[in-house]
Amino acid sequence: MIHLTLIAIGLLAGVLSGMFGIGGGLIIVPALLLLVKMEQFSALGTSLAALIPPVGLLGAFEYYRNGHINIKYAAIIAAGLFIGAYFGARITLGMSPEVVRKLYAVFLLCVAARILIWGK
């Protein structure tokens, strides 16, 4: 079951990354905290490891050195990111820039409300 959750996290982050250029800090970390119940530093390190090639090699190495990366989880999320980003880009390129801008604003408001209302 955890593998399906991780794949879903990766796919969602990939689609939203393809649509809005986001993923790690806004999708993966909160999803690992809320859905997988990881502790904060492990969620941060695992997210960086999933995004490593272009984003966080040195930062992820430091989290890894301190024992805060779940390599297996990061690899599964990365697979979802790879596939999801393609579909997110395909979906978004079929929309007008105005619609994409509004969708992104609504998405950010939903994330902010979630953090304000239900966050610890």
Image (tube, rainbow, N blue to C red):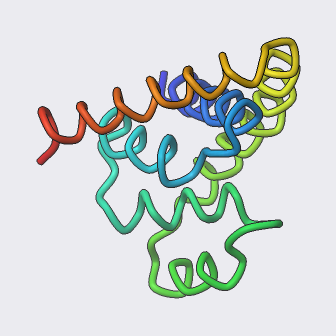
Q: Is residue 81 above or below residue 92?
A: below
In the rendered view, tell whether residue 103 sits above or below residue 83.
above
- Number of marks in the rendered image: 0
| Residue 92 percent coordinates (x, y) | 78, 21
Q: Is residue 15 left or right of residue 107?
A: right
Residue located 70% across and 58% down the image: 51
Residue furthest toward the front?
Answer: 98
Image quadrant where residue 97 sits: top right
- At 24% from the left and 32% from the top, the residue drawn is 114
Q: Position of residue 103 (x, y in %)?
A: 56, 21
Above-or-below relation of 70 to 84: below
User: Toward the viewer: 60 or 67?
Assistant: 60
Location of residue 89 (image quadrant): top right
Q: Residue drawn 30% across and 37% down?
A: 34
Rendered residue at 86%/12% (across/down): 94
Percent coordinates x, y for residue 14 in the rendering: 71, 34
Of 96 and 35, which appears nearest the observer?
96
| Left or right placement of residue 111 versus residue 15 in this view | left
Task: Give whichever of 71, 108 is nearer the camera.
Answer: 108
Picture layout, residue 43 above or below residue 1: below
Residue 101: x and y, percent? 62, 28
